[in-house]
């Protein structure tokens, strides 16, 4: 992997130059939170923490049309736009790698693949806040899954990892802005920065051996208590970078003389999700739905792909109104103290 | 043969009818493919004898006349669609129990000549309802989506999940997390989460979501410092008779 340097004062200029390749998106502030938006790079917020929606919105938008049927013919609708997404943190890059395996390996999804191939991933290093726990999921450092990765170490330069041939092409657009000369001092600074970053995590979450604990906990009453609090609002699934379930619906657009097939995000937290023909519901109870969600996040993916599907981004911590999230659920299963509405009055 | 369709109004504000009429361009296409037999607000066609394929009914049942019309429409229609909150849940008018008292307060001691008022009820209290289009008022896209499906002889497939889903799709900051009384989690989606998108908490006008967890949201908001009375009042507005707030 090639590692080069970029003068920090040249970042905006560089990102602007990439507009020649595609739309440039990056994190901008929205109230107290952040979102990925298509804006001038001078508006990107380099201190951004997790965005409300993860980057999955670029590859599987919340709702989109797959194809239309008109005059006896059907026509697929692909999103052909080329996009550069700047400012992805390690957790989000891990999230994309998990989606890649789901949508590109066994059952290739043409809509995902088209968008994914047209998107350049430009990572950016970050410092954790009190909700980040990627250090517990071991997703705080990336080795793959990006085209370029910018590390904001102390000093005047970003260290830039070139992770793909597309990334290499993108640096060639403004070769003049980069410096090939990574010095011993730069390397030391980077190592020091990592040490400092790792010490900043506030989380005390330890996920070692979590799959076993989840497996032996299926019948424990704690699930009923969490289930009583769950609002089935689905927010957790919508914001999770690795939640990927969707529903497919047909619409008769009679006023345009066509029929279209749409895909929209779904959630295993919704009752209808587990409803099958004939009226049987496999997960009638909220507690059963929560078990499914947490099995996927803490163990399920493990048996299929060798890794749990939680990347420690903390979005469920931000999104669940009643404090049902990976750190709280994992701790509760391990008998540790939890500060959540469903865990009060327990001790 | 074109499907025969009727639009009927019982007691309500006609907001749903208005929203359907607001679909101007698409409505003309609809009138091309169906035969409208009755449309209270938009046409003089009043053919009350023909059998209908689809009847759209707005409003709650609030008078004997309403009830009579509803039963007639049900008898002659293959599919009856309850349109809007009043038709599905009874509307804001059923949120309190003191019906007689309120009637007196508004009309005084009068003799009703034309028709006698009866306590407000949703259509489902009296007849079979085959499909619903929720909202106060309904969302135009949901009406078109439902109409499209019904024209093909299949049932509408509107969102059955809570407002929060679409709210997240729009990447809104969560107002409930910020301590506001947002009823999104206990309210049926389909409106595009317009209120939170404009920074206004959801008051629940699409009615209770099928599996609403009122007690959890109530407990949560109590913890955030709201009074039981305030919460009860807010949750009752669009709760119909299905929502029980302790
Ligand atoms: S489960 Fe929570 S912390 Fe883990 S990846 Fe999903 S949203 Fe992020
Ligand atoms: S766990 Fe939380 S965010 Fe998820 S559905 Fe339940 S209440 Fe909503
Ligand atoms: S703002 Fe309201 S509707 Fe939106 S996610 Fe929060 S609780 Fe749900
Ligand atoms: S956000 Fe709530 S109050 Fe606003 S339109 Fe939707 S359902 Fe009605």
Image (cartoon, rainbow, N blue to C red):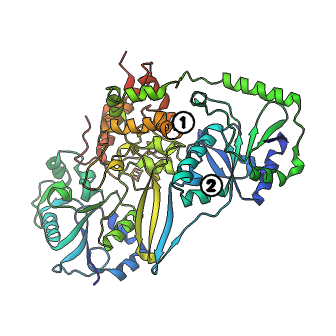
Does the closest atom of ligand 1 sit within 8 Å of the Cβ of label 2?
no
Q: Secondary structure at mark 2?
A: helix
Does A250 appear above or below B217?
A: below
Rendered image: mark on residue A116: 2
Mark nearer the viewer, 2 or 1: 1
In the image, taking residue B119 as reference, residue B195 lies left or right, namely right
Examine the rendered structure and indicate whether residue A125 appears above or below residue B190.
above
* Residue B230 in sight: no
Where residue B177 appears, as percent x and y from the top left, is: 47, 36
Residue A159 in percent (x, y) is at 80, 37
| Residue matched to label 1 | A307
Between the C-alphas of marks 2 and 1, the distance is: 22 Å
Provide residue A199's location: percent of width, then percent of height. Answer: 67, 21
- Quarter of the render that holds ligand 3: top left
Residue B227 position by quadrant: top left
Q: Give the crowd class for mark 2: few <14, some 14-19, many >=20 residues within 10 Å.
A: many
Residue B181 spot, x, y in % from top left: 41, 39
Earlier residue among tags 2 and 1: 2
The residue lying furthest to the top in this view is A347
Q: Chain of mark 1?
A: A
Lateral position of residue B89 relative to residue A218, left or right: left
**Picture residue at 42% right of the left edge, 59% below the top:** A248
Q: Nearer the viewer, residue A111 or A252?
A: A111
Which residue occupies 40% across, 43% down?
A233
Vertical position of residue A218 compared to residue B40: above or below? above
Q: Quadrant of the N terminus of chain A?
A: top right
């Amino acid at each position: 992997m090639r590692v080069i340097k970029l003068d920090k004062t040249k970042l905006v200029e560089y990102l602007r130059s990439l507009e020649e390749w595609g739309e440039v998106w990056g994190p901008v502030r929205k109230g107290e939170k952040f979102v990925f938006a298509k804006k001038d790079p001078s508006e990107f917020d380099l201190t951004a923490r997790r965005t409300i929606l993860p980057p999955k919105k670029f590859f599987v938008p919340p709702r989109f049309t797959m194809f239309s049927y008109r005059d006896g013919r059907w026509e697929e609708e692909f999103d052909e736009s080329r996009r550069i997404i700047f400012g992805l943190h390690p957790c989000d890059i891990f999230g994309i790698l998990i989606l890649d395996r789901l949508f590109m390996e066994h059952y290739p999804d043409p809509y995902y693949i088209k968008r994914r191939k047209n998107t350049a991933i430009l990572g950016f290093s970050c410092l954790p806040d009190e909700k980040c726990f990627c250090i517990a999921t071991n997703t705080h450092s990336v080795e793959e899954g990006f085209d370029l990765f910018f590390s904001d170490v102390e000093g005047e330069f970003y260290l830039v990892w070139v992770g793909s041939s597309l990334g290499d092409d993108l640096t060639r657009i403004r070769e003049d802005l980069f410096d090939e000369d990574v010095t011993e001092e730069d390397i030391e600074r980077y190592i020091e920065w990592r040490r400092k970053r790792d010490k900043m995590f506030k989380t005390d979450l330890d996920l070692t051996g979590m799959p076993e604990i989840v497996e032996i906990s299926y019948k424990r009453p704690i699930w009923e208590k969490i289930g009583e609090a769950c609002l089935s609002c689905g927010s957790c699934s919508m914001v999770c970078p690795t939640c990927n379930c969707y529903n497919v619906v047909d619409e008769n657009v009679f006023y345009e003389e066509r029929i279209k097939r749409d895909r929209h995000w779904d959630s295993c937290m919704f009752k209808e999700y587990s409803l099958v023909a004939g009226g049987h519901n496999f997960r009638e109870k909220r507690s059963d739905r929560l078990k499914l969600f947490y099995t996927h996040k803490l163990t399920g993916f493990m048996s299929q792909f060798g890794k749990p599907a939680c990347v420690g981004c903390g979005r469920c911590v931000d999104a669940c109104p009643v404090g049902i999230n990976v750190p709280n659920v994992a701790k509760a299963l391990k008998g540790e103290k939890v500060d959540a509405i469903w865990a009060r009055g327990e001790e | 043969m074109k499907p025969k369709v009727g639009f009927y109004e019982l007691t309500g504000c006609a907001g749903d009818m208005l929203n359907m009429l607001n679909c101007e361009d698409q409505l003309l296409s609809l009138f091309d493919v169906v035969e409208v037999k009755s449309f209270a607000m938009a046409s003089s066609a009043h053919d009350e004898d023909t059998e209908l394929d689809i009847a759209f009914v707005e409003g709650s049942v609030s008078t004997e006349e309403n009830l009579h019309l509803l039963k007639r429409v049900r008898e002659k229609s293959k599919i009856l669609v309850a349109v809007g909150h009043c038709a599905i849940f009874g509307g804001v008018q059923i949120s309190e129990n003191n019906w007689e008292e309120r009637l007196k307060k508004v009309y005084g001691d009068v003799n009703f000549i034309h028709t006698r008022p009866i306590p407000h009820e949703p259509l489902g209290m009296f007849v079979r309802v085959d499909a619903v289009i929720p909202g106060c008022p309904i969302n135009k896209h949901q009406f078109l989506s439902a109409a499209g499906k019904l024209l093909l002889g299949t049932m509408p497939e509107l969102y059955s999940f809570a407002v929060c889903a679409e709210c997240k799709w729009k990447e809104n900051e969560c107002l409930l997390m910020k301590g506001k009384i947002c009823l999104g989690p206990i309210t049926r989606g389909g409106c595009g989460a317009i209120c939170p998108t404009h920074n206004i908490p959801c008051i629940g006008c699409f009615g209770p979501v099928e599996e609403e967890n009122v007690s959890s949201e109530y407990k949560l908001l109590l913890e955030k410092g709201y009074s039981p009375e305030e919460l009860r009042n807010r949750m009752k507005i669009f709760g119909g008779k299905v929502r029980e707030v302790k």
